[in-house]
């Protein structure tokens, strides 16, 4: 097993964000340094994200544990050798098993080249990843951030990011135009801003509420 790696950032990135925005500056000072683990194996990252769709982190950990134990090494060759029925038996749906075997087949035949992703810019890498069955834009963005360690990922499709923005900036909603304003403000270090917005959304600042909750509550 290799040493655990974390998303790398430091004073340069936080100083820039703090210079751009007083509210995010206050969050950075209050929360302090954040350590988020990286997933350094691209193939496994894609498979893990497909497995984890629409299930809890606890369920993902259970399925991934059975998958890793059953296959030994999770790579294209072992996935294809196992086949869809065996993948399903590890606890995932047949649809996810189909997505994963299709991905493995494309990697094995060279139709999808994982090594070329590292040479692509963000937009190209997101387009390539989201062309895979079972991989959407949000999943592609998470792979860019937590596997390729790209510095400027702020995902509009991430509900926790939107919640963090509402909480920090006291908005009831975050339409795309408003979101883009923040994306531009945080660039080129949107990934670091994401770490702090996730922290706020997860309760890192006790007493900071979500102004959007009351509005959604009225609709229910």
Image (spheres, grey):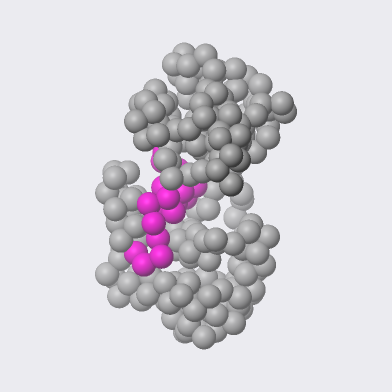
Residue 96 image offset from top left, x and y in percent: 48, 72
Foreground of the two, 55 or 199: 55
Please give the name of the residue rendered at 53% of the width and 66% of the height, measured from the top-left corner: 51
Vertical side of 99 occupied by 84: above or below: below
Q: Which residues are magenta?
A: 132-153
Q: Viewed as shown, does residue 153 lie left or right of 23?
A: left
Q: Is residue 140 magenta?
A: yes
The residue sitting at 32% across, 72% down in the picture is 106
Location of residue 134 with respect to 80 vertically, above or below = above
Query: Quarter-wise, where is residue 204 in the image?
Result: top right
Q: Is residue 204 above or below residue 75?
A: above
Asked if one can make out residue 25 in the rendered structure from this viewpoint, the answer is yes
Provide residue 185's location: percent of width, then percent of height: 39, 23
Q: Which residue lies at the image location 33% right of the left edge and 50% below the top edge?
A: 126
Q: Position of 28 compared to 188: left or right?
A: right
Q: Position of residue 23 (x, y in %)?
A: 54, 18
Q: Is residue 178 magenta?
A: no
Q: Residue extending furthest right? A: 206
User: How many marks can you see?
Assistant: 0
Residue 34 in the figure: left or right of residue 83: right
Give the quarter of the figure containing the N terminus: bottom right
Measuring 45% from the left and 33% from the top, which residue is drawn there?
174
Question: Residue 180 occupies which quadrant of the picture?
Answer: top left
Residue 12 visible somewhere in the drawing: no
Q: Measured along the vertical axis of the image, is residue 75 above or below residue 183?
A: below
Residue 146 position, x and y percent, is 49, 47
Q: Quadrant of residue 189?
A: top left
């Amino acid at each position: 097993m290799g040493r655990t790696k974390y998303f790398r950032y430091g004073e340069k990135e936080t100083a820039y964000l703090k210079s751009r925005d007083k509210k995010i500056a206050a969050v950075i000072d209050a929360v302090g340094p954040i350590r988020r683990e990286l997933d350094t194996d691209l193939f496994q990252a894609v498979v893990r994200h497909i497995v984890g769709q629409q299930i809890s982190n606890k369920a993902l950990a259970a399925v991934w544990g059975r998958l890793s134990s059953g296959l030994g090494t999770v790579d294209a060759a072992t996935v294809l050798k196992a086949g869809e029925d065996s993948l399903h038996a590890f606890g995932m749906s047949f649809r996810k098993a189909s997505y994963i075997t299709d991905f493995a087949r494309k990697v094995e035949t060279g139709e999808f080249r994982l090594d070329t992703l590292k040479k692509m810019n963000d937009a190209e890498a997101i387009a390539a990843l989201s062309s895979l069955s079972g991989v959407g834009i949000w999943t592609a963005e998470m792979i860019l951030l937590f596997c390729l360690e790209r510095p400027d990922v702020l995902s509009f499709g991430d509900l926790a990011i939107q919640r963090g923005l509402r909480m920090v900036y006291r908005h009831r909603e975050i339409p795309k135009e408003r979101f883009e304003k923040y994306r531009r403000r945080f660039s080129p270090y949107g990934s670091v801003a994401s770490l702090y917005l996730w922290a706020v959304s997860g309760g890192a600042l006790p007493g900071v509420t979500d102004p959007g909750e009351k509005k959604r509550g009225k609709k229910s």
